[in-house]
């Protein structure tokens, strides 16, 4: 009997398809790790929590916004290290490569604007990034999916060399 119940659960989980339609709304709770890369950047990293809200204008195209809170370590000129929290945000467009499937891959384009508490005389103060990347949603049931996304962001600052790498994961709910 135990094997029959396990078999039914596995078959029902395997048949969990996400079906996205025009007008659907998606809310995602994502955590991510990001690191700035480039010639003038020391080793660094930051963890962030993001809540995103998106609306599907077609079954394949979604536009949205994502407020973010970032946590990072900061070493001041006296050598003291502290943990800081900053609020940032982004606007995004996702293009799904499938409409009704258990796993839906997608491409993304985003504009991220980070706001860091930096001295006014700092050499680099523009933390705006144009990101491109790819992700996938693995549906747990018809409405909820495990979401994974990786992006590379190009710095929008004039003369900047480098960018930002972001790896995100979390839960998405479509209604």
Image (cartoon, rainbow, N blue to C red):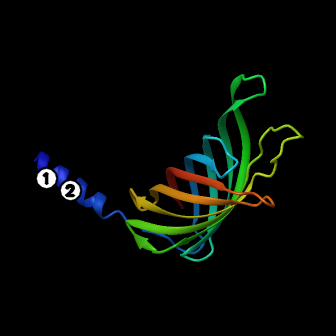
Query: Which residue in the protein does label 2 denote?
Result: 8
Q: How many marks?
A: 2
The location of residue 64, given as percent across then percent down, is: 66, 63
Above or below 141: residue 100? below
Residue extending farthest front: 39
Question: What label does residue 119 carry, if any?
Answer: none
The kind of secondary structure element at disc 2 is helix
Residue 133 lies, in percent from the top left, at 56, 64
At a point 46% along the width and 68% down the height, the residue shown is: 105
> Residue at the spot x=61%, y=43% of the render?
49
The image position of residue 85, as x and y in percent, is 70, 35
Which image quadrant: the C terminus?
A: bottom right
Judged left or right of residue 39, residue 158 is right
Identify the secondary structure beneath mark 1. helix
Mark 1 → mark 2, Cα distance in angstroms = 6 Å
Residue located 65% across and 41% down the image: 42
- In the displayed structure, does residue 135 sit left or right of residue 123? left
Is 8 in front, or is 60?
60
Find out whether the residues at labels 1 and 2 contact each other: C-beta distance under 8 Å: yes
**Rendered position, 9 above or below 20:** above
Q: Which residue is mark 1?
A: 4
Crowding around mark 2 (Cα neighbors within 10 Å: few <14, some 14 to 19, many 20+) is few
The one of 26 and 106 positioned closer to us in this rendering: 106
Task: Decide: is 37 above or below 17.
Answer: above
Q: Quadrant of residue 48?
A: top right
């Amino acid at each position: 009997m135990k094997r029959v119940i396990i078999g039914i659960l596995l078959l029902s989980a395997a048949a969990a398809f996400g079906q996205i339609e025009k007008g659907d709304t998606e809310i995602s709770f994502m955590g991510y790790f990001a690191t700035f890369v480039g010639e003038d950047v020391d080793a660094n990293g930051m963890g962030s929590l993001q809540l995103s809200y998106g609306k599907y204008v077609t079954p394949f195209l979604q536009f949205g916004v994502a407020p973010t809170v970032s946590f990072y370590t900061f070493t001041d000129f006296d050598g003291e290290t502290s943990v800081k929290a900053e609020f940032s945000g982004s606007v995004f467009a996702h293009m799904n490569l499938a409409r009704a499937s258990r796993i839906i891959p997608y491409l993304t384009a985003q504009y991220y604007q980070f706001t860091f508490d930096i001295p006014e005389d700092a050499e680099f103060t523009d933390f705006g990034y144009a990101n491109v990347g790819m992700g996938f949603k693995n549906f747990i049931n018809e409405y909820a999916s495990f979401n994974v996304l990786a992006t590379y962001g190009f710095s929008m600052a004039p003369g900047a060399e480098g960018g930002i790498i972001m790896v995100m994961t979390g839960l998405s709910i479509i209604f």
